[in-house]
Amino acid sequence: MVVESGTIDKIYCAFILGSTAVSMGTEVHMYFTFWGLQMLQKGEMEKARLPVEYQHMEESFWKKLEEMKYPTPYELLKSMKGSGLLHIYACTPTMEMFGVKKENLIPEVDKLVGAATFLDIAADADVSLFI
Amino acid sequence: MVVESGTIDKIYCAFILGSTAVSMGTEVHMYFTFWGLQMLQKGEMEKARLPVEYQHMEESFWKKLEEMKYPTPYELLKSMKGSGLLHIYACTPTMEMFGVKKENLIPEVDKLVGAATFLDIAADADVSLFI
Amino acid sequence: MVVESGTIDKIYCAFILGSTAVSMGTEVHMYFTFWGLQMLQKGEMEKARLPVEYQHMEESFWKKLEEMKYPTPYELLKSMKGSGLLHIYACTPTMEMFGVKKENLIPEVDKLVGAATFLDIAADADVSLFI
């Protein structure tokens, strides 16, 4: 799974699909690039918002999640990580393009890699998605 | 195929790919989530618009489609459905997050399911796309 | 690979994944539709910008790429094309919808085709992505 987007809807999609796969006993490989990579910086995932087209739904969206006591994206990520089945890759070309430093990434990141690693893994995967 | 987006360009992409697959005799499974799920509510698909980046092309886009007598997304969906090869799934977590009620969905929806059902189907599919 | 998007982040993602695949000796098939198809018109790829959500990062993004002497998208495309492993398809329904003429496309385009050709190729591919 490539996570390119950094809006909260796509992050939730990626993490809900990932959590579900993990709960089914499947290995999940997430390769974070561009805006997705930004989300791996400490404190950034909490700032993710809806896309501009849907800003008017922002308030009711968060209120509803709170009512449902829905886990935050970072809670979902840590829970997946706890299973031992989630592998998190940070895209090195993106890190260079945006000046992202390794020490600012959340500790759950497994490896800093380029696109070749992703393609190798995707070629063997049952399902590959670009989110 | 996961349909996450609710802008008209992505809806057309998903439905044109779907229609083509159906015309080739292929089974098509569409899992609607987030903004895609919103489109399954009665009357919502007709309101889909271009992404904000392309608002200036909105008027000429619709005019061109009219000139071409291009089918609307809902017409494409009903035509695919008529083939018996299209399966439409509505994402239950999204329905809860956005307070979408079953009775407001278009009658073409086959099942209300979670992500596990999608992953099971995707694992056996020839092509899986996240749109 | 379907390239539907026309923002610079997605174009770079598609082309970096493509370049990497080509450098690994893999055949790459790119099917350009909607905003991606617009990018195949002469002079359009150079005008690609970040999505509206990230406009505030536009200036520093381009400055950084210049400092890194990073190849432009068109340079990446020509370099992939030079390998003989890249196949570029322009989506004919999109060309009709947007009134795009064949003679305005860059010369690297191999074929003008519909969605059926893409699905045939995707069904045999190791990895299929919708970008």
Image: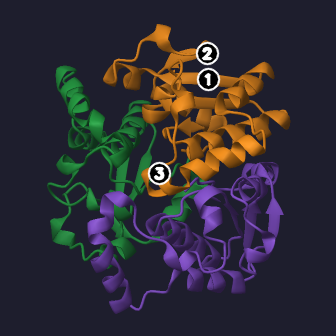
Chain colours: A purple, B green, C orange
Instruction: Pinpoint the chain carrying mark 2.
Output: C
Specify the amino acid type for callout 1: Ile
Q: Is residue C11 visible?
A: yes
Residues at discs 3 and 2 both on one chain: no
Q: Are marks 1 and 2 on the same chain?
A: yes
Q: Chain of mark 1?
A: C
Give the mark nearer the N terminus: 1 vs 2.
1
Nearer to us in this view, B107 or C24: C24
Amino acid carrying label 3: it is: Met
**Whether residue A20 is situated above or below residue B26 in the rendered picture:** below
Question: Please, what secondary structure does the residue beneath circle 3 have?
Answer: loop
How far apart are labels 1 and 3 at the CA level? 23 Å
Examine the image and state in which quarter residue B75 appears.
Answer: top left
Left of C6 or right of it: where is A57?
left
Question: Dot 3 surroundings within 10 Å: few (below 14), some, or many (20 or more)?
Answer: many
From the image, state whether disc 1 or disc 3 is nearer to you. Answer: 1
The structure residue drawn at horizontal position 25% and vertical position 41%, both measured from the top left corner, is B73
Rendered residue at 56%/23% (across/down): C89
Q: Nearer the viewer, residue A38 or A111?
A: A38
Quadrant of the drawing holding the N terminus of chain A: bottom right
Q: Disc 1 versus disc 2: distance between alpha carbons?
A: 5 Å
Q: Which residue in the protein does label 1 denote?
A: C88
> Disc 2 on helix, strand or loop?
loop
Left or right of A15, for residue B57? left
SS of the residue at dot 1?
A: strand
Q: Which residue is mark 3?
A: B1
Q: Which mark is residue C110?
A: 2
| Circles 1 and 2: CB atoms closer than 8 Å | yes
